[in-house]
């Protein structure tokens, strides 16, 4: 996996926890929006074992009702990830 291919996983887990959602519930919410993801894929994203696509980032932001930039750690916004 490319270094920095997933810098949002920990924030996805944090936001999910803050909302009181299980991984299964988050997966269901994403699937309702027409985005295919499994609980295993989500678990790998949250634990930084899998990279994240731009589409996944957009869907996570939509499901959590946050700006895309809020998914990134401080000082790691989309403009300076590379």
Image (cartoon, rainbow, N blue to C red):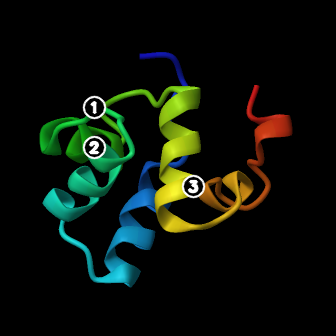
Q: Position of residue 55 (x, y in %)?
A: 53, 30
Q: Quadrant of the C terminus?
A: top right
Q: Measure the alpha-carbon separation of dots 3 and 1.
A: 15 Å
Instruction: Answer left or right for 23 relative to 8.
Output: left
Give the residue at x 22% y 35%.
41
> Mark 3 sits on what residue?
61
Which residue has dot 2 on it? 31
Asked if residue 79 lies left or right of residue 25, the reply is right
Frontmost of labels 2 and 3 is 2
Which class describes the residues within 10 Å of circle 3: few (<14), some (14-19), or many (20+)? Answer: some
Circle on res. 28: none
Q: Residue at x 73, y 54 (%)?
A: 69
Residue 3 x, y percent position in the rendering = 54, 24
Tell me the residue that label 1 is attached to.
Answer: 36
- Quadrant location of residue 45? top left
Please state if 78 lies on the left or on the right of 72 as rendered. right
Earlier residue among tags 3 and 1: 1
Identify the element where label 3 is drawn.
Answer: helix
Q: Are marks 2 and 1 in contact (CB under 8 Å)?
A: yes
| Cβ atoms under marks 2 and 3 closer than 8 Å | no
Whether residue 75 is situated above or below residue 49 in the rendered picture: below
Location of the N terminus (image quadrant): top left
Give the mark nearest the N terminus, 2 or 3. Answer: 2
**Does residue 4 appear anywhere in the picture?**
no
Residue 21 x, y percent position in the rendering: 25, 74
Q: Residue furthest right?
A: 79
Q: CA distance from mark 2 to mark 1?
A: 5 Å
Distance CA(mark 2)–CA(mark 3):
14 Å
Secondary structure at badge 1 equals loop
Q: Earlier in the sequence, mark 2 or mark 1?
A: 2
């Amino acid at each position: 996996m490319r270094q920095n291919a997933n810098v949002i996983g920990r924030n996805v887990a944090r936001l999910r926890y803050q909302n009181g959602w299980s991984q299964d519930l988050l997966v269901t919410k994403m699937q309702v929006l027409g985005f295919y993801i499994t609980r295993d894929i989500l678990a790998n994203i949250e634990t930084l074992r899998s990279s994240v696509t731009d589409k996944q980032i957009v869907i996570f932001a939509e499901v959590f009702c946050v700006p895309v930039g809020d998914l990134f750690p401080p000082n790691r916004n989309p403009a300076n990830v590379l």
